[in-house]
Image (cartoon, rainbow, N blue to C red):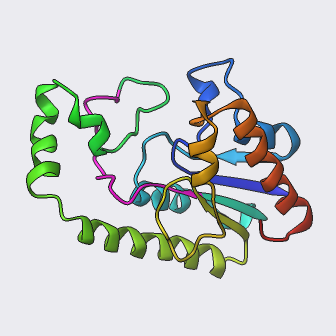
Amino acid sequence: MQLLIIGDSFAADWSVKYREKHGWPNYLADKYSVTNLAQAGCSEYKIKKQLDSIKLKDYTHCIVTHTSPSRIPVEKNPLHYNDTLHHNCDFIYADVAESSNIEVLCVKEYYEKFYNENFYRYVYELIAQDIFDTLNGAKIKTLHISFFDYPLRCLDFNYYKLFKKLPGTTNHLSEIGNKKVFTSINHWLESDEKI
């Protein structure tokens, strides 16, 4: 089994910055051959770019962790580009709302005055469908998950309630939360049954 993980910070390898952090992606890597391309803070667009960056024929299984529809892709985020974990982070309102960084004040203003939620959700759904179609066309056994309270059509399972119940400091989950996610995904990998 060759497992590919793509997605946002819920699936990223936090041990690149915090060596002591061991989240559900690390538990999977302890058991399987894993390539984890997930990046903290990335938009759905960059998740699609993660997928486009590899040869799909090299993988038998894939886990896609879909992100928030409200992320705005950027080339360089001045709030996080020097951070080991978040170096490829896109904008999200929660990051810019409290920031005093002069470079992102215009982004805050954009979110507050001009941001069109319906447009970004529409684009987000189109990209998510493109990810789904690409993996389906490659005949890779794929699990589409999310930790956000958003009803994306292609999702196999949404961990939003678990995230709210068991928040923590590794992949935004507690140790128990990470182990629960690992257990359910491991069951899918071993049985090929949906969660």
Tell whether 80 sits left or right of 1.
Answer: left
Residue placed most toward the observer, 194 or 123:
194
Q: Residue furthest right?
A: 191
What residue sits 80% from the left and 54% below the top? 184
What percent of the width, then of the height, locates residue 73? 31, 52
What residue sits 49% from the left and 70% below the top? 151
The magenta region covers 65-81
Tell whether 190 sits left or right of 80.
Answer: right
The answer to whether residue 74 is magenta is yes
What percent of the width, then of the height, locates residue 77? 28, 36
Q: Quadrant of the N terminus?
A: bottom right
Count every numbered label the image shows and give the total.
0
Q: Quadrant of residue 82?
A: top left
Residue placed most toward the observer, 138 or 174:
174
* Vertical position of residue 168 compared to residue 39: above or below: above
What residue sits 9% from the left and 44% below the top? 109
What residue sits 40% from the left and 60% below the top? 45
